[in-house]
Amino acid sequence: MIITVIRTAVVYFFVTLAIRLMGKRQIGDMQPNELVITLLISEIAAIPLQDNSQPVLNGIVAIFILVILEIILSVLAMKSIKIRKLMSGNSAVVIKNGVIDQKMLKKVRLTVIDLIELLRGQGYFKIEEIAFAVLEVNGNLSVVEKSQFRPLQTGDLKHIKVEKATLPLPVISDGKIIYESLSSLNITLSELKKKLSPHLPEDVFLMTLDRNGEKEVIMKEKER
């Protein structure tokens, strides 16, 4: 009995440590590869608890191999957009300019009922109020309302003119240009560089741009 208690405590400690090393995401916020690693860790941790003949050390080693693999993949995903897409997939725009993209719904295997339920979960009960809805890779739905349905903000008092809502897209991520976003926005590389001038793409941590030309630029922090 005492041995079982000790084995359980040891496994609990190391599984907790492994999860902490992986980060602080909740289950609902995990990327697909993170969820797979978490499920594998839970399965491996259960083996020495169910069978006292199995060495606890074997399970601990296997768990930390998975954690190291996850950390390595995370670092590679930060450096390469292709690896990031391979491991995590792409977000999907399921409502574009107020119109449901039926082909995209089929592609992500989402029914219109599922979409309505996700919208209700975000507090939206009428599809006609939505300009854009993006299904993120973690399953969450991000929503942009049409201008006429947005709550009035203090800054809006300066511009009574209502503009068409647009979806900001990331065009530069960690110094790398996202050409798919440029294509969606119908802008060329030279136009992007003009908007970014006098900065260079490799100096930018994140740049977003919408069809109205509104941009947001976050520069990389300088190494000390």
Image (tube, rainbow, N blue to C red):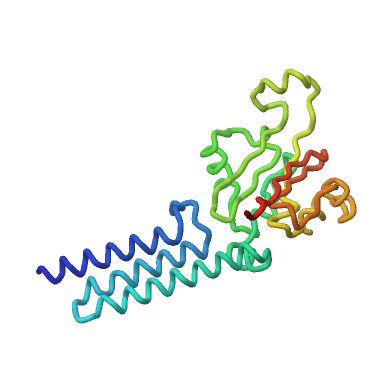
Location of residue 4 in the rendering, given as x and y in whole percent from the top left corner: 15, 69
Location of residue 118 in the rendering, given as x and y in whole percent from the top left corner: 54, 43
Q: How many marks?
A: 0
Please tell me which residue lies in front, 182 or 97. Answer: 182
Q: Residue at 59% x, 58% y: name it.
A: 109
Residue 107 in which image quadrant: bottom right
Q: Residue at 54% x, 37% y: name it.
A: 120
Q: Quadrant of the N terminus?
A: bottom left
Location of residue 122 in the rendering, given as x and y in whole percent from the top left corner: 54, 37
Please tell me which residue lies in front, 2 or 51. Answer: 2
Q: Is residue 156 above or below residue 174?
A: above
Residue 223 in which image quadrant: bottom right
Q: Residue at 78% x, 33% y: name it.
A: 164
Q: Is residue 150 left or right of residue 181?
A: left
Q: Quadrant of the C terminus?
A: bottom right
Q: Is residue 112 above or below residue 179?
A: above
Q: Is residue 218 above or below residue 71?
A: above
Residue situated furthest front in the rendering: 224
Please tell me which residue lies in front, 58 or 142. Answer: 58
